[in-house]
Image (cartoon, rainbow, N blue to C red):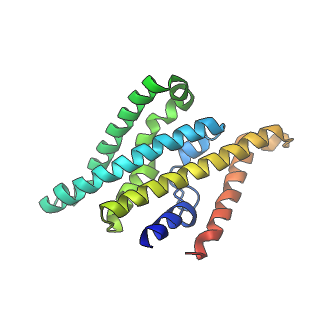
Amino acid sequence: MEYIIIIIGAIFVNNIVLNQFLGICPFMGVSKKINTAVGMGGAVLFVMTLATIVTWVIQNYILNPLGLQFLQTIFFILVIASLVQMVEIILKKVSPALFQALGIFLPLITTNCAVLGVAILTIQKEFNLMEGVVYAIANAIGFSLALVLFSGIREHLDLMEVPKGMRGVPIALVTAGILALAFMGFANLV
């Protein structure tokens, strides 16, 4: 039952993008096409899950025993940067089209505060390794859900007649705000 609460809470109630407002840069930048949003969601799922596993192990078996908790952020960023480089190399080989579509936003996963935020929150919430992995996967799914929903809405808006002053980024920001309000409505459910 605890895992179900973690999953529902991370995806719907405390969505990393729409409620905690972490990871906004790729949310706004990669959300123009559904294909790209799905690819970014997959990359974030991979990086977030592995980063949470590695950072949990580093925190509990290196930093805590040696009293080096103050180095947590530096270690976590190094782990995330390494994992993003690995994803970048794999995507370049496996799917050059997706690699090109993601462009600059792929290396920006390194500085995506959602990935670092989940790694740090896993430690702060004192999750065990399995709970941390479930939390990371659920947050990545929530990130992907927000990205795909928003990209679908943006694709639809491109087909609609939007007033000239609201085209592009302005209507995207208004839409993101409304989407965030909709997700915040789930906050009282759990």
**Residue 172 % position (x, y):** 70, 46
Q: Quadrant of residue 123?
A: bottom left
Q: Residue at x 50, y 23 (%)?
A: 96
Q: Would residue 132 be found to the left or right of residue 29 on screen?
A: left
Camera-nearest residue between 160 and 74: 160
Which residue is pictured at 36% across the width and 55% down the height?
119
Horizontal side, residue 27 vs residue 174: left or right:
left
Of the pair 130 and 99, the residue shown nearer to us = 130
Image location (x, y in percent) of residue 92? 45, 25
Figure check: 166 above or below 63: above
Left or right of 117? Residue 187 is: right
Q: In this rendering, is residue 91 above or below 183? A: above
Q: Quadrant of the N terminus?
A: bottom left
- Specify whether 70 is left or right of 41: left
Looking at the rendered image, the quarter that the C terminus falls into is bottom right
**Residue occupying the far front of the picture:** 1
Is any atom of residue 73 visible in this view? no
Residue at the location (50% across, 62% down)? 10
Q: Measured along the vertical axis of the image, is residue 143 above or below residue 85?
A: below
Residue 157 drawn at (x, y percent): 78, 43
The answer to whether 107 is drawn above or below residue 18 in the figure is above
x%, y% of residue 133?
A: 37, 57
Residue sitting at 60 percent across and 52 percent down? 146
